Image (tube, rainbow, N blue to C red):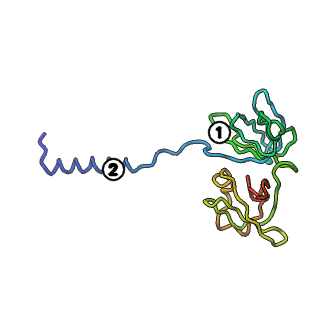
Amino acid sequence: MRLSLSTGVLIGGVLLASAAASAGQQPPPIGGVTGTIALEGTVQKTYEGANTVAVKTVDGIEHLFHVSDRTVVHGGAAGDDHPLHGIHDGSRVVVHYTTEGDHEIADEVDRVAADGLQAIEGVITNVVRHARTISIRLPDGSRQTLQLTERAASDVGRDLDAGALGTVTGVIYYDDRSGRRVAHYFKRQS
């Protein structure tokens, strides 16, 4: 078979176009859930020996979370070596977790209680993730701006889009250490 110069240019152009098209393609999407997820619920049972905690979420689903020495607990017993100390059956918690295969790994457990995180309700008026702030208008008309933790700024409240802000009633869970309110979790009020 004899190829002319113009046929060789045509074949070369098709090969280059094909290579450019495949180089510009996006990789296939990752299946399942990625990133950190936060759920609110009630502790059903702690298993300190197995480093796990069973939490029934507000929607009625029970999750078994694995904890490690990297798990951060807010509102637990200060200065204790075990991350679950101070988290008891019946405790209200917010668990920030990631999935690794079939396991849900608790990155942070926030206890909601008088000596844990506090809650305020109002209309969420602004969320500035890069500045790590959230603003809320309280029922008395006053406004507060709270600092967001890094985890809350990056992973929490993604269902609150800019168009809904100022009209969405929400709840913010925060601690008040060193006289400064820091929000760990926020959500739409159901």
Circle 2 crowding by C-alpha within 10 Å: few under 14, some 14–19, many from 20? few
The amino acid type found where label 1 is placed reads Thr
Q: CA distance from mark 2 to mark 1?
A: 36 Å
Mark 2–mark 1 CB contact (< 8 Å) = no
* Residue drawn where x is 42% and y is 49% of the image: 25
The amino acid type found where label 2 is placed reads Ala
Helix, strand or loop at disc 2?
helix
Helix, strand or loop at disc 1?
strand
Image quadrant of residue 97?
top right
Task: Determine which residue is flagged by label 1.
Answer: 99
Q: Is residue 167 above or below residue 118?
A: below
Disc on res. 113: none
Residue closest to the eye, 123 or 23: 123
Disc on res. 20: 2
- Residue 103 lies left or right of residue 189; in this view the side is left
Q: Is residue 124 above or below residue 48?
A: below
Q: Earlier in the sequence, mark 2 or mark 1?
A: 2
Tell me the quadrant of the picture where the C terminus can be found: bottom right
Closest to the camera, between mark 2 and mark 1, is 1
Circle 1 crowding by C-alpha within 10 Å: few under 14, some 14–19, many from 20? some
Tell me the quadrant of the picture where the N terminus can be found: top left
Image quadrant of residue 163?
bottom right
